Amino acid sequence: MDLHNFLFILVSLITTVYLWTQWIEPNWFRLHRETIRVNKSIKKPLTILHISDLHFTKERPLLRRFFDRLAKIDSDFVFVTGDLIDSREGIGPCVEHLKKLKSRRGIYAVLGNHDYRIYPAHKQWIRMLTGKDCSMERPETNELKKALQEAGVKLLVNQNMPVPINESQEAVIIGIDDPVTGRADFSQAFRGIENGTLHIALVHAPASFPSLRRFGIDAAFAGHTHGGQIRFPGIGPIPLARRLSAIIDSTDCYGFAGIVSRGLGAQDLTRLRLFCRPEAILVRIEGM
Ligand SMILES: [Fe+2]
């Protein structure tokens, strides 16, 4: 092979990988289905639509089409596990998309670190490589909270809410505030829970799963890791992702079903994805 052919193949390869990881796979959304079995007797299986890590900065036409598809799903609950926005302009489209979703028992959400802090894009790589926090307080967090509440989304900030799931049983949804920015208060979040057939926790980062073990919950939903964003078939996420979070995928290692979403977005400069399609998860919860 002469030099010209070699350079042509090399440039074509780099261009293809760039286009795929930056533009094609980040917009190739999937609806992933999981079934979990809890150690409780529930009269009828529950269907949960789990959304996470939207990172909205503006309208995203392809994501809108995916939400139009999600809006046709008739679920019992919609759970949203944080990182809804990355700018003030993201609040409008984020709330508009969530409002479209149908659920018999409502939409419940917790916030993530990007909802509370601004991570300057050019410093994200420093954070990934060194773990050093280069973030600043986000001024529009209260605006986001207000918009969610006005849209009927139940935002749980270290609090819990009992919700009937049939005539004689109820689920308690426990929302833990963002652990990444030090806002999680587990005792406060679980305070006052007396009964409830099913106890389900929502938390942005799955690194909190070990702390949830002592509360005897049935299931937990999280996001934050984006699945590692770069994965290889048969191997999983790259080692850098493991450095940022020990728990990246769904797990039942902590005495409950821990569902971890790969999310539907990422911050602009770090949005690349390879073998890690953005996703919403449709979870079926079955009893004994
Ligand atoms: Fe995120």
Image: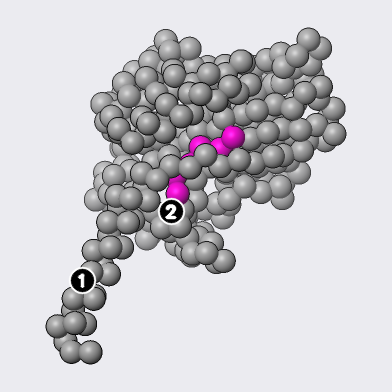
Main SS, magenta region, reads strand
Q: Is residue 41 left or right of residue 71?
A: right
Kind of residue indicated by mark 1: Val
Residue under numbered circle 1: 11
Q: Residue at x 51, y 24 (%)?
A: 72
Relative to 127, say whether 89 is above or below.
Answer: above
Q: Is residue 58 visible?
A: yes
Magenta part of the chain = 277-282
* 91 drawn magenta: no
Q: For the C terminus, give its image quadrant.
A: top right
Would the CB of label 1 be found within 8 Å of ligand 1?
A: no
* 278 drawn magenta: yes
Q: Residue 267 at x, y = what percent?
A: 33, 43
Residue under numbered circle 2: 229
Q: Residue at x 27, y 69 (%)?
A: 13
Q: Residue 269 at x, y = what percent?
A: 27, 49
Q: Residue furthest left?
A: 4
Q: Residue at x 21, y 82 (%)?
A: 6
Determine the CA span between mark 1 and mark 2: 23 Å
Q: Residue at x 48, y 12 (%)?
A: 152
Viewer-nearest of labels 1 and 2?
A: 1
Q: Quadrant of residue 240?
A: bottom left
Q: Is residue 156 visible?
A: no
Relative to 54, say whether 196 is above or below.
Answer: above
Q: Is residue 93 left or right of residue 279?
A: left
Number of residues whose C-alpha sits closer than 10 Å to that of mark 2, classed few (under 14), some (14–19) or many (20 or more): many
Q: Is residue 238 left or right of residue 77?
A: left
Kind of residue indicated by mark 2: Gln
